[in-house]
């Protein structure tokens, strides 16, 4: 989902130095920094993509403060999680398990050998591979044919099924174990980033790393990237994260200091979402706007968890109008 980097509902993500830091910016793509000391940077989408592909945007990490060195327990990666019930056709855990192929375009200011990991959540298993970026600041096409997993079943539910991890830095705790390259094994820390060798994106000031045209499919051959309309991609992303701007609306049940209103989400979330204020809520009193902090509830109408209830309390009676934007987060 969002393999062409068409959708970024959130603001650009700015990562500051700290032992652990993480978050989303491009929809469905997540950065995780573990035990880094100095590293800071930005994660976003940009209007840059390989020529003659129909792609127009890419996911981009930029290092603004490099890590001095990579300690044994340090790790940095870009991740994409796939919902388990979308993966049942792989038939994992049976003798009919399928070969699959991942393909993507990558560009980095740093050349070298990079690791990629596929994690099977329900079976707690990993398989890895590597690819080599040969030319700096040049788009390169990568494919990886992944062996079938006959021993680990993917549950048919709305949890995490598979997790793709593009490794950008790994200490010896995570890449110093035995090989699981193109071989499914039970998860151990030492094989998590097996084969990853180039940490320079993280240790080089102003270094960049970009991805686009990511596609995962059944079979042993990569096919041309399947483009889809923007609104299709956006609707898929809304299952995991959506922002609802309520404009200027009349307040139901307005009393002297209280109102309540229910909003129907445009797409049913994957699970009960976490609701948060995205932009300041205001109500109108005496011809001017006044800020307030709402409380939220989640309710269903037979299509569970689609209604978000907004409550305003301890208000000075106004003219019955309010505005604001909330986010509904159901990410894996």
Image (spheres, rainbow, N blue to C red):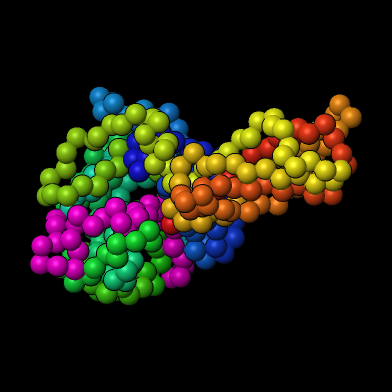
- The N terminus lies in quadrant: top left
Q: Is residue 129 visible?
A: yes
Numbered-mark total: 0
Q: Is residue 81 magenta?
A: yes
Give the percent coordinates (x, y) of residue 306: 51, 47
Examine the rendered structure and indicate whether residue 209 appears above or below residue 117: above
Q: Is residue 115 visible?
A: no
Front residue (pair 55, 94): 94
Give the percent coordinates (x, y) of residue 10: 54, 41
Examine the rendered structure and indicate whether residue 229 appears above or below residue 311: above
The answer to whether 308 appears left or right of 169 in the picture is right
The answer to whether 193 appears left or right of 311 in the picture is left
- Write the start and end of the magenta stretch as one range: 71-99
Give the percent coordinates (x, y) of residue 106: 31, 41
Picture residue at 10% right of the left edge, 62% below the top:
96
The answer to whether 246 appears left or right of 124 in the picture is right
Picture residue at 23% right of the left edge, 70% below the top:
152
Picture residue at 16% right of the left edge, 43% below the top:
222
Front residue (pair 162, 268): 268
Picture residue at 43% right of the left edge, 42% below the top:
237
Examine the rendered structure and indicate whether residue 7 appears above or below residue 102: above
- The C terminus lies in quadrant: bottom left
Give the percent coordinates (x, y) of residue 154: 27, 64
Q: Is residue 245 magenta?
A: no
Q: Residue 289 sits in which quadrant? A: top right
């Amino acid at each position: 989902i969002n393999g062409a980097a068409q959708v970024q509902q959130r603001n650009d993500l700015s990562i500051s130095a700290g032992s652990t830091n993480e978050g989303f910016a491009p929809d469905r793509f997540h950065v995780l920094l573990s035990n880094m000391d100095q590293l800071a940077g930005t994660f976003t989408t940009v209007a840059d993509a390989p020529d003659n592909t129909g792609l127009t945007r890419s996911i981009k990490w930029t290092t603004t403060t490099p890590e001095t060195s990579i300690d044994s327990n340090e790790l940095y990666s870009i991740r994409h999680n796939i919902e388990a019930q979308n993966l049942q056709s792989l038939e994992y855990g049976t003798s009919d398990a399928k070969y699959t192929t991942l393909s993507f375009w990558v560009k980095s200011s740093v050349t070298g050998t990079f690791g990629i990991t596929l994690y099977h959540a329900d079976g707690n298993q990993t398989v890895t591979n590597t690819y080599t970026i040969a030319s700096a600041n040049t788009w390169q096409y990568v494919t990886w044919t992944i062996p079938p997993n006959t021993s680990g079943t993917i549950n048919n539910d709305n949890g995490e099924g598979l997790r793709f991890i593009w490794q950008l830095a790994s200490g010896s705790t995570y890449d110093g174990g035995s090989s699981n390259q193109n071989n499914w094994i039970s998860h151990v820390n030492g094989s998590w980033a097996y084969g990853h060798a180039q940490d320079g994106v993280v240790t080089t000031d102003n270094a960049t790393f970009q991805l686009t045209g990511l596609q995962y499919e059944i079979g042993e051959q990569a096919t041309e990237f399947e483009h889809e309309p923007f609104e299709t991609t956006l609707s898929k992303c809304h299952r995991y994260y959506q922002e609802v701007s309520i404009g200027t609306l009349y307040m139901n049940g307005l009393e002297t200091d209280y109102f309540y209103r229910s909003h129907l989400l445009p797409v049913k979330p994957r699970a009960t979402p976490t609701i948060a204020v995205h932009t300041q809520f205001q109500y109108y009193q005496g011809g001017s706007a006044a800020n307030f902090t709402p409380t939220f509830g989640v309710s269903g109408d037979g299509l569970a968890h689609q209604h978000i209830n907004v409550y305003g309390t301890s208000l000075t009676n106004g003219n019955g109008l309010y505005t604001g934007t909330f986010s509904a987060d159901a990410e894996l």
